[in-house]
Amino acid sequence: MEKRKVLEVNNLNLELDKSKILTDFSFDLEKGEVLAVIGPNGCGKSSLAYTLMGLSGYEEKSGEIKLNDEKINGMPTNKIAERGMTLAWQEPARYEGVSVRKFLSLSLKSQGEEVNDQKLAEALEEVAIVPSKYLDRKIDDTLSGGERKRIELASILLMEPEVVILDEPDSGVDVVALNNISQVIKDFREKGTGVILITHNEEMLQMADRSILVCNGEILRKGEPEDISRYFKYECVPCEDENYQEHLEVSTFG
Amino acid sequence: MMVDAYKEAGGDDVFADSDVAHIVLERDKVLGTNSVDGLEVEVKKQKKGMVAVKVTILKNYKISNPVHMCFGVLPEKGKQIIDMEVEVEKNASVEIMADCVFPNATEVVHEMEADIRVHEGGSYLYEENHFHGDEGGVKVLAKSNITLEKESEFKTIFNLRKGRIGEIDFDYESVVKEDAVLEMIARMQGYADDKIRIREAGDLIGKGSRGYLETKIALQEEAEAEVLNELTALADGAKGHVDCTEIIKDNAIARAVPIVDVRDPGAKVTHEAAIGSVDNTQLQTLMAHGLDEEEATDVIVQGMLNS
């Protein structure tokens, strides 16, 4: 697969209610690469995802976000999606009255593609969901969080994005679903989609090509997933520790 | 012409089918009727613009196909008053699809006053679908008195299928006797200066009676809605639920007043009311799939209205 940067983030800063959430955040992502983002709860991982996607309320204070060499700062979320970056939420939304078929069709329509049940069925099968049982179901409380997660992943598969941000795809799913999600990440990689994988799960982390450890909105370390994981588990001090700054490491890549 | 306007607006072509009973009324003119076994329909002009319609479903008859009633006013201006009486006799059942068509309205008034009695074991489903023009020049005033005898069932569903609401004022009163079931559902979307007022009231007077009132409204621009849902439980085992959801945008105003009145310790009535803007996670998820804000809002609102 050709080596090409699809996403570049330079010195990104985010403040919410005058609190620093992300500080001088810089990294890049190559085509078909899986970059894991780990860190304790509340360290800014999801805020990073929302800022990259240009969500309302998460407008960066400064810094640059480039998708395929195009600056996307300030673009509305749908324009960023049109340019090939999307997000799968930690807690996927429920849609009263919206069927799985309708939801998946929107992904095809937004790509200007013709909707047909065969394409929708293939995407559902890829996340191990039986199309005949689910296409007419509504995306509401009758579906579990794990089912909604997989349906959202199916919709993203249909979008064929350049970059996908997966915000804790492993949370709230059973072991079988976890295997399906792992397979989908492999599929993204094979298709050349760059993946930003926000996770706490050891197994998921091992799928990554590189990893970054986030603490208090800053990148504490970058490196091989195994090294970062080991550091996080055995050497990392709590973010609240006054000496945590000493653990900040000069980037060795990106 | 009425049927053409109805079909053009998206209605089903059922009026040529001899197995489907129907009535077609344009203002006070009867344009067509067809009846089937077990169904009696009398239509009589009372005065200019006013028609009395009496519908009787005879004892033990189950009308298999929905009965279609097509009401409307075709010119830009006009008035239609319908005085409706419905008797569903013992153990009879019927499903009525009322299609109200006002495609060109700029100053149209449609008034309906209905007395409905569903006798013991009877069942009456009334689905009202409105097809309006884009001018909002329709005023719909509907008043119903409903009596549900022992073990009967009544369900009404209101949908605005096309165009702008204009002004709607519903006032439904019902009395629900032993083990009878009342269900009233209204779904609509208001734009511009549309005005919606809905009052639905049910007195659960019979032991084991049931009542369910559900209203879903989406408003934008300067539209306003007021929903007053009242359920009163007066007998042992009576149960009910009131559910009102309103989504607002722009300068729209929504009010919901659920009244739950329980006067028997063996009865139970619950209520839920939620008024707010479109859910942010829903909206942003769809935008992350490439839909702009308007398209995403439309998917969410239509989903809510169709649920």
Image (tube, coloured by chain):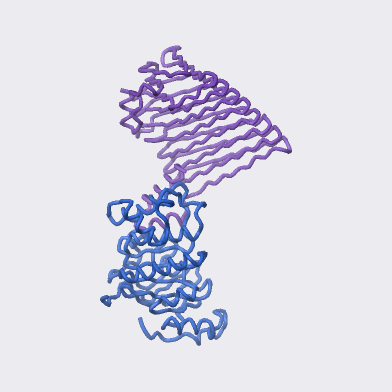
Q: Relative to residue B167, is residue B151 drawn left or right?
A: right
Q: Please, is residue B203 above or below residue A27 in the view?
A: above
Up/down of A131 relative to B11, above or below: below
Of residues B306 and A67, the one drawn nearer to the viewer in this rendering: B306
Q: How many marks?
A: 0
- Residue at 62%, 27% (x, y): give it: B175
A159 lies left or right of A24: left
Q: Position of residue B62 (x, y in %)?
A: 50, 24
| Quadrant assignment for the N terminus of chain B | top left
Q: Which residue lies most toward the right here? A: B265
Give coordinates of residue B35: x percent, y percent.
42, 18
User: Which chain is displayed in purple in the rendered image?
Assistant: B
Q: Nearer the viewer, residue B31 or A251?
A: B31
Quadrant hosting residue B47: top left
- Whether residue B155 appears in this view of the structure is yes
Residue B83 in view in this figure: no
**Residue at left 43%, top 27%?**
B65
Taking B31 as reference, is B95 above or below it?
below
Q: Position of residue A37 (x, y in %)?
A: 44, 75
Which residue is found at the position 27% from the left and 54% from the top? A112
Chain A as rendered: colour: blue
In the rendered view, would you say B61 is above or below B222?
A: above
Q: Quadrant of residue B188?
A: top left
Q: Position of residue B66 (x, y in %)?
A: 43, 27
In-front residue for pair B138/A251:
A251
